[in-house]
Image (cartoon, helix red, strand yellow):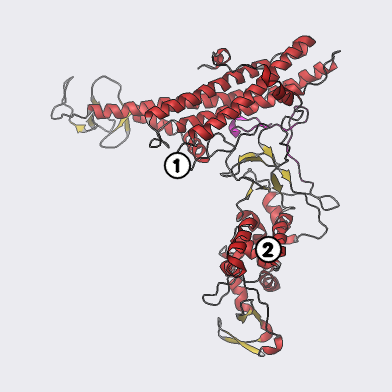
Amino acid sequence: MEMEDYASSDEDYHYDSDQDDSVEAYENDEDYALLSSKGPTTKVITKESLLVAQKEDLRRVMEMLSVREQHARTLLIYHRWDVEKLFAVYVDKGKAFLFGEAGVTVDEHPDSDSSLPSTVMCYICMEDVARVETTRMDCSHCFCNSCWIEHFIVKINEGQSKRIRCMQHKCNSICDEAVVRTLLSRKHPDMAEKYERFLLESYIEDNKRVKWCPSTPHCGNAIRVEDDELCEVECSCGLQFCFRCLSEAHSPCSCLMWELWAKKCRDESETVNWITVHTKPCPKCHKPVEKNGGCNLVSCICGQAFCWLCGGATGREHTWSSIAGHSCGRYKEQEKTAERAKRDLYRYMHYHNRYKAHTDSFKIESKLKETIQGKIAISEEKDSTLRDYSWVNNGLSRLFRSRRVLSYSYAFAFYMFGDELFKEEMTEAQREIKQNLFEDQQQQLEANVEKLSKILEEPFETFSDDKVVEIRMQILNLSTIIDKLCQKMYECIENDLLGSLHLGIHSIAPYKSKGIERASELSVCWNNKVNTGVTAELDRASGSGSSDDNGCSSRKRARKDGLGGGFFDLNLPAEFVDRN
């Protein structure tokens, strides 16, 4: 279906008067990117709030198990900062199992200094060392400070600083982080600082619910999700991304589908497909050769003659119908290969052209925000009874979000109904039924999106009040319809398409009517100073941040574009979006 035919589709989803309640909801939605009434379920963790976020989980474990901070951190690192999982192991298998598995040894009855001899044999360097120059861990193993320091430095340089084990053979105990920090800071303050930073950043590196924002250059933020990890989020720097795979937000594609599609578009693999269709490799130099005549005897620039039908090397003596000394019966096999490659190329072009058409449409429509802002300003200056024009911004927001869904729906359809992923999962008859079901919904959505795009371009600032009211109702109606169609498409994908497959590795982020959720910043207000070395390292890694006199974060907020100061809430491939 051509772009200009979308608006005239007989499959259009028409507005029904029963949808009045939904329309009212859109009309009153002044901030078109508002979140649900439950509030944000994702948090932005800046370098200032990283320590606070870590302290929250540490405090819960310390209170629950009555342990010191270093032991709580060891337990959490072992369980990848999953507090609920840690508590579940504690309830099911007990404290002894929990501690032993994580390498935590609580020395409840340490030996007094008077019970130790004045000199101690260090079984690492085999030297007699003064007692004051040795350190004993909670597991009761005692070695000289020099050996301990060398051990710590080696482990930190090897990237094992978050779980440094005791030097004793077969001892599973994790070294006390306070001891590690104290010994290193005496002679190697730089290593102590590095060790401290690794412990702090383990909250992000080892935590399945916290991930670094994949922005380039890196904004220095991390995102923590409170509920499902399969979601799309927006960082305070403005980047929208898939939390699971850290690629750009790509629903309704699964992560694997988007990875394959992005690679297919990026490496121009279809150029290779074209070469397969239109050329044959020379049997001597193996370079691709294109036939420019009707004769099936082909000569390469290297001088080698070969049969175009089978690719076999031949001599040059031939007639129109045969080649001397050569015969081949593999014409049909070669024909099938070429036809299959040609079919795959045309199929890819079909989906890619429509995918790109919607991304290009968004690029053009994104310029509407400035135009509409001007139209609103003119309309507000008129002597009119109409004062509220938020419905225009809401309609534009709905247009952008639906463009995103449509764009990625073609990448989804390419793999859903192709042979790459689900060839063994469906019969041809099942594939045809599901494809027709999906494409019917896709076409309905497409037709109404094009209608909304056309109406938003109307010069409503020149219309009479009655005409503006009519335009307003059309935009509200179409916004409601498009939202419902997007919901239906996602339900179809989750239940009828992906949900019926045995291969359960394909899941998609849920549809959100209000758009991709913007993560709220974790509040940071504390009086005690954060370790300056850690803060300095994070500053160097992520750029400078600032704070007010109370110690509260004053980092740059999420970017805003026009539309009355609202957030510009849409994600599409970066190369198609003019972010200026």
Would you say residue 560 sits in the magenta stretch?
Answer: yes
- Dot in front, 2 or 1: 1
Would you say residue 94 sits in the magenta stretch?
Answer: no
Q: Identify the residue under disc 1.
A: 503
Q: Is residue 344 visible?
A: no
Name the amino acid type tagged 1.
Answer: Leu
The magenta segment is 554-580
521 or 267: nearer the viewer:
521
Q: Which mark is residue 196?
A: 2
Q: Quadrant of residue 318?
A: top left
Q: Quadrant of residue 397?
A: top right
Does dot 2 land on a helix, a strand or a loop?
helix
Percent across and percent down for residue 104 are: 61, 70
Q: Is residue 377 visible?
A: yes
At x 70%, y 85%, the residue is 112
Q: Residue furthest left?
A: 325
